[in-house]
């Protein structure tokens, strides 16, 4: 079992990132470790070049993200924690895969279509080709499992298509160059919505800070955001079916359940019939209880750039070691 996943260093990590991604990384790090496998988690700083970015901000966001990952429970002794930019094997592998990836495949990527919109001519080449870098990110390490959000499923399928074509064109039946990775996609409940609008995803790119709980928020800020969260005037239903047309209520119940390790039905068995005046303080308390220790560790770690850089350097050295044999095999297979 080899688990590989990346997370972009843009903006402040929030509750959605934690419940939808980071918390799963921590569980997978332990699963992989127990199975005698390994988990590689990288900060996708090279991906940041696909959009306009501020160099100083990229550096500080990268360090903040390492601090966050460690604060959430990723252990640099168990998982390999690094940033892409320190492992040039990634862009090197991307170039080798560029010969195999087809323009038509990339043109079909919905994220490219969404992000480019009507102005395709004005986009960076990196925005178009970054799914190939994503393929390189996982194929380089012979990943067997890749945890991704629903939105990244298509990119992982592209990685499999590239691996398959490369194996067909340049490998032999008994010596394929690349492993075809399987996605690990969290359940529907892992999609956390904005606190201001139950139909929008909780996201760093939402201009309103009140729309999300940041992992770096202090207890008062968290409580305030929950208190101001958009809701309807009805009490909570006692059955899950009663949440069907109430996206804001459904989201808050989902957050409570995800943090408490309970199903929506279990949360409603406890809070059904109660109004938000009672439920919101309970949710705020739970958030503070679960995220408070993470925040405290984050605050301890975040300013020690030397220690954070050391974690990244150590992880990068291990990652280079893990990736080198596959990169070499790909070069050889291509006649290089
Ligand atoms: P954002 O949308 O805030 O910019 P990213 O796109 O950087 O977040 O996503 C980083 C990881 O967090 C991905 O694995 C993504 O699927 C997950 N993620 C982001 N937002 C949410 C959310 N609201 N609910 C669940 N998971 C999320
Ligand atoms: Na995003």
Image (cartoon, rainbow, N blue to C red):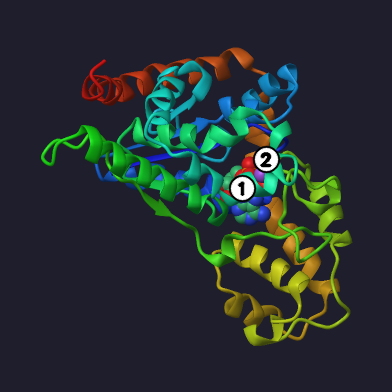
- Residue for badge 1: 111
- Locate the N terminus and report the quarter of the image it occupies: top left
The answer, for residue 285, to whether it is visible in the render is yes
Per the image, label 2 sits on a secondary structure element best described as loop
Describe residue 229's horizontal placement relative to residue 32 as left or right: right
The answer, for residue 68, to whether it is visible in the render is no
Residue 164 location in percent, x, y? 29, 44
Marks 2 and 1, Cα distance to the nearest angstrom? 21 Å
Residue 257's place in the image compared with 316, above or below, is: below
Q: Which label belongs to residue 13?
A: 2
Describe residue 60's horizontal placement relative to residue 93 as left or right: right
Res 173 → quadrant: top left
**Image point (81%, 53%), residue name:** 211
Residue 330 location in percent, x, y? 27, 25
- Circle 2 or circle 1, nearest the eye: 1
Q: Residue furthest left?
A: 174
Per the image, label 1 sits on a secondary structure element best described as helix
- Locate the C terminus and report the quarter of the image it occupies: top left
Mark before the other along the chain sequence, 2 or 1? 2
**Beta carbon of the mark 2 residue lies under 8 A of ligand 1:** no
Q: Which label belongs to residue 127?
A: none
Residue 237 location in percent, x, y? 72, 85
């Amino acid at each position: 079992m080899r688990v590989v996943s990346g997370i972009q260093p843009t903006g402040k990590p929030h509750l959605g990132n934690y419940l939808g991604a980071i918390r799963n990384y921590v569980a997978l790090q332990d699963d992989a470790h127990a199975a005698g496998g390994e988990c590689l988690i990288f900060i996708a700083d090279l991906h940041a070049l696909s959009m306009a970015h501020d160099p100083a901000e990229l550096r500080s966001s990268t360090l903040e993200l390492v601090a966050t990952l460690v604060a959430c429970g990723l252990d640099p002794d168990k998982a390999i924690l690094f940033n892409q930019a320190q492992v040039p094997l990634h862009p090197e592998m991307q170039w080798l895969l560029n010969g195999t990836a087809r323009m038509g495949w990339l043109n079909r990527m919905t994220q490219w279509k969404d992000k480019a919109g009507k102005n395709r001519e004005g986009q960076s080449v990196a925005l178009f080709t970054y799914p190939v870098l994503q393929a390189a990110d996982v194929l380089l390490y012979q990943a067997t499992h890749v945890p991704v959000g629903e939105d990244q499923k298509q990119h992982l399928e592209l990685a499999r298509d590239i691996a398959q074509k490369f194996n067909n064109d340049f490998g032999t039946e008994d010596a394929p160059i690349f492993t075809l990775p399987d996605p690990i996609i969290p359940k529907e409940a892992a999609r956390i919505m904005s606190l201001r609008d139950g139909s929008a995803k909780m996201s760093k790119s939402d201009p309103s800070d009140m729309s999300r709980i940041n992992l770096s928020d202090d207890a008062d800020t968290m409580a305030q955001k929950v208190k101001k969260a958009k809701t309807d005037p009805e009490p909570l239903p006692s059955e899950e079916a009663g949440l069907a047309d109430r996206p804001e209520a459904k989201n808050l119940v989902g957050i409570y359940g995800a943090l408490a390790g309970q199903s929506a039905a279990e949360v409603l068995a406890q809070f059904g019939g109660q109004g938000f005046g009672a439920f919101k303080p309970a949710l705020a308390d739970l958030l503070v209880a679960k995220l408070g220790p993470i925040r405290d560790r984050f605050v301890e770690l975040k300013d020690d750039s030397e220690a954070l850089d050391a974690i990244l350097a150590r992880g990068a050295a291990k990652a280079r070691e893990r990736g080198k044999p596959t990169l070499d095999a790909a070069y050889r297979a291509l006649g290089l």
